[in-house]
Image: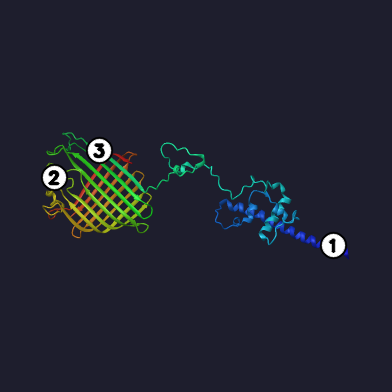
Amino acid sequence: MLTASLADAQSQRKGVQRKGEDKTEQVYKAYLDSLVALKQRYENWTYTGDDVLTNPYYYSLFASPTFYAASVHRVLPPLENNYRPRGAVDTTLVYVSDALNYVYTHAPWLIVHNETDIEAVPDIREKKPTHIKPDISMTRKTGNTVPEQDEDNLFDASAIVVRRPNFWTFKTTIDLKIKQNYTSENWYRGGESNNSWLAQVNFKADYNNKQKITWSNLLETKLGFHSLKNDQYHDFIADADVIRFTSKLGLKATKHWYYTVSWQSWTQFTRGFRSNNDHVYSDFMSPFETNLSIGMEYKQNVTGFNLTAAIQPFGYNMKYVDRKGLASANGIDAGKHSKSTYGSNITMRHEWNIAKNIFWKSRLYYFTNYERVLVEWEHTFKFSINKYLSTDLSLYPRFDDSVKHEPGDCLLQMQEMLTFGLSLTL
């Protein structure tokens, strides 16, 4: 009977032992499965803080293979009475210890470190060394060379220069066009020789803080002459003469709409004549026109196409002539230098790369004081030959019913110009 009791006890003990081994084997297999799963997961993994690595109990499983005595002493008799952990033990920690013990007993050759080896298992709380040299590419050089730094103070604030973002962009375009035509006196179709040239310089300065505020500035200058062999009064006459400045301050309202305040002013460089006539039709500051408007502007920028359209219902327009004799011809009362009106205007500009070597830009300006209307619509087609040479076709229709005219006169004015020459963008 005693033998039977001992056999039953031994069988029960083996069952308990076998049950513990099965539990340890399950944890071990689960550990191996988790490593495989984590390997697949971490190929394109981004840490979010929601995973098993957030539990510090798993550190010993995922760190370098190391022998931890505490895991062994949880299953073996203690060497010292005060060594065995006392009190409640977290179930997760027990499973981790069993998994480590299984590895220690079944695959000890995989363990490469001991927990007493301080150099092999660095403290994860250890501070980063202060002797790391800073990346000089993240700073701006002061002068031609990088200043020497003390090894004990490599992070000296005086050696680091923070560059403020630059919200300004600048662009300059320069065009010089030349045209020459020779016709002999006995040419069967008649005609006469002439020469012409055109110089054009545009300067653009734009501010955009990428949040709310934009400020665009554009200065346009154009001056061109052509010769007249049979003109009794002039050797050359200006056929293109413009000085125009546009400034626009915008406050972003939506993705494409801005509240804007714009200022436009324009005049010309020199006196304007007609063939075989010494009468001055225009001059510098005669006329001079300026417009200040408030409204909204729409902006659209896509690849190869930029559009701005300003609708400004509140505008002040002032026209001035330095030569009083030109007052009536410019819609100003005789004997006066200036005239002010109030109204509204629309200004549209677009730039479009139609094809690789074909570029089209235009400007539409419309102003009305609800009695008179001024409309200008400039077009420039640029056909690029290479980086520096191009052919330009300019069309400039204009309508102004405020100027002095006789009944039946056509108020539509038109200027066309085809040029070839140098074109440079800076």
Label 1 near label 3: C-beta < 8 Å?
no
State the image coordinates of residue 425 (x, y, percent, origin top left): 33, 41
Colouring convention used in this rendered image of the protein:
rainbow
Is there CB contact under 8 Å for labels 3 and 2?
no
How much space separates mark 3 and mark 1, taking CA atoms? 118 Å
Mark 3–mark 2 Cα distance, whole angstroms, equals: 25 Å
Position of residue 311 relative to residue 227, above or below, is below
Residue at point 31%, 46% (across, down): 204
Left or right? Give the position of 144 relative to 6.
left
Marker count (numbered): 3
Residue 25 versus residue 131: which sits nearer the camera?
131
Specify the amino acid type for callout 2.
Val
Left or right, 21 with respect to 308, comes to right
Task: Tell which circle, 3 or 1, labels the residue nearer the N-terminal end.
Answer: 1
Disc sitting over residue 280 in the figure: 2
Kindly state the secondary structure of the residue where label 2 is placed: strand
Query: Percent position (x, y) of residue 330?
Result: 16, 52
Given this view, does label 3 or label 1 mark the residue nearer the observer?
1
Q: CA distance from mark 1 to mark 2?
A: 132 Å
Which part of the image, by quadrant, shows the C terminus?
top left
| Amino acid, disc 1 | Ala
Image-quadrant location for residue 276: top left
Q: Residues within 10 Å of mark 2 (few under 14, many from 20)?
A: few
Residue 138 against residue 17 in the figure, above or below: above
- Using the image, tell me which numbered label, if any, was put on residue 29: none
Q: Horizontal and vertical percent for residue 339? A: 16, 55
Mark 1 or 2, nearer chain start: 1
From the image, tell me which residue sits under label 1.
7
Q: Which mark is residue 178?
A: 3
Residue situated furthest bottom in the rendering: 1
Q: Which badge, 3 or 2, is on the more N-terminal residue?
A: 3
User: Could you say whether the residue bearing mark 1 is in a helix, strand or loop?
Assistant: helix
